Amino acid sequence: MARHGSQKVLKRLNTPAHLQIKRKHGIFFVNPTPGPHPSRFCLPLLHIVRDLLAIVDTHKEAKKLIGLGHFKIDGKIIRNKSYPIGLMDVLSIDNMNKYYRILPDSHHGLILHEISEQESNFKLCRINNKTTIKGGHIQLNLHDGRNILIKVQDPRKPKEDKYKRMDVLKISIPEQEIQKVLRFKENNIAIIFSGKNIGQVGKISNVLKRYGPKASTVSIQHNGDHTETLYDYTFIIGEENSEIDLPKIEN
């Protein structure tokens, strides 16, 4: 990483392939700030505004527009040009009536997929871990860095403890109210978000659990074929049908 005044820039040649950076963008490129998504698998807000959506042409113009508060991530105004935007995040540009969800893609790693205003009011979050905290309450740790507290009335009989790791929550944004729980189980619809089969969508046909997440695998039925991927690379997006709009598959 280049030290261009501070550690806020990357050399263009060292950037991840999914950033889709063109030669015209020069030597240096904005480095995402630490945040809820891995730095090697996110899109800095300035890159989206200037390069992917081409709303403006220059770094300076993009920085100014972001500073004016025209962009929301998951329903909250973001003024940080380097803010990392990742899997399932929702970008809203209200004054343009444009809304996007970040999805995995086989060609680019991450893409902006345009969605309706109605769909921009929720997002899907995977439960990566859950912990019991003081008072016997349950904290759900989600894939995008947020935590949701589940209040438990009786810690000896926690009937509220109905959530499992790898389940996916459909939550309202920015309120974080749980609208639906999508179970990680066979016959539910999943998308692969990492590895060589990234972007594939299909029904889970088999889950083979071994010791450790890197050893466990999931088989997904996709276009009549079965694709095997790592347990941790799967993300439930629906039961009978997908809860989110997906890109059209080109033949």
Image (tube, rainbow, N blue to C red):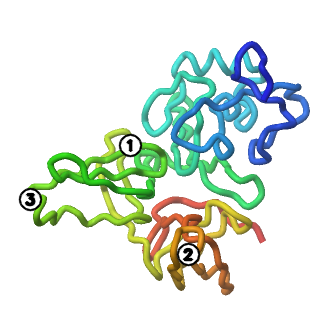
Under circle 2, the secondary element is loop
**Real-space Cα separation, disc 1 to disc 2, in angstroms:** 32 Å
Identify the residue shown where x is 15% and y is 55%: 152
**Real-space Cα separation, disc 3 to disc 2, in angstroms:** 34 Å
- Nearer to the camera, 153 or 65: 153
Identify the residue shown where x is 38% and y is 43%: 173
Relative image position of residue 145 (x, y in whole percent): 45, 43
The amino acid beneath tag 3 is Asp
Task: Give the residue number, with chain letter if any, for mark 1.
Answer: 173
Under circle 1, the secondary element is loop
Relative image position of residue 183 (x, y in whole percent): 39, 71
Classify the position of the C terminus by image quarter. Answer: bottom right
The amino acid beneath tag 1 is Ile
Asked if residue 71 lies left or right of residue 13, the reply is left
Relative image position of residue 134 (x, y in whole percent): 19, 46
Relative image position of residue 170 (x, y in whole percent): 38, 56
From what the image shows, is residue 133 above or below residue 11?
below
From what the image shows, is residue 80 above or below residue 104?
above
Task: Give the residue number, with chain letter if any, for mark 3.
Answer: 154
The amino acid beneath tag 2 is Ser
Identify the residue shown where x is 84% and y is 33%: 12
Classify the position of the N terminus by image quarter. Answer: top right
Binning the other alpha carbons within 10 Å of mark 1 as few (below 14), some (14 to 19) or many (20 upward) gives some
Q: CB atoms at circles 3 and 1 under 8 Å apart?
A: no
Task: Give the residue number, with chain letter if any, for mark 2.
Answer: 216
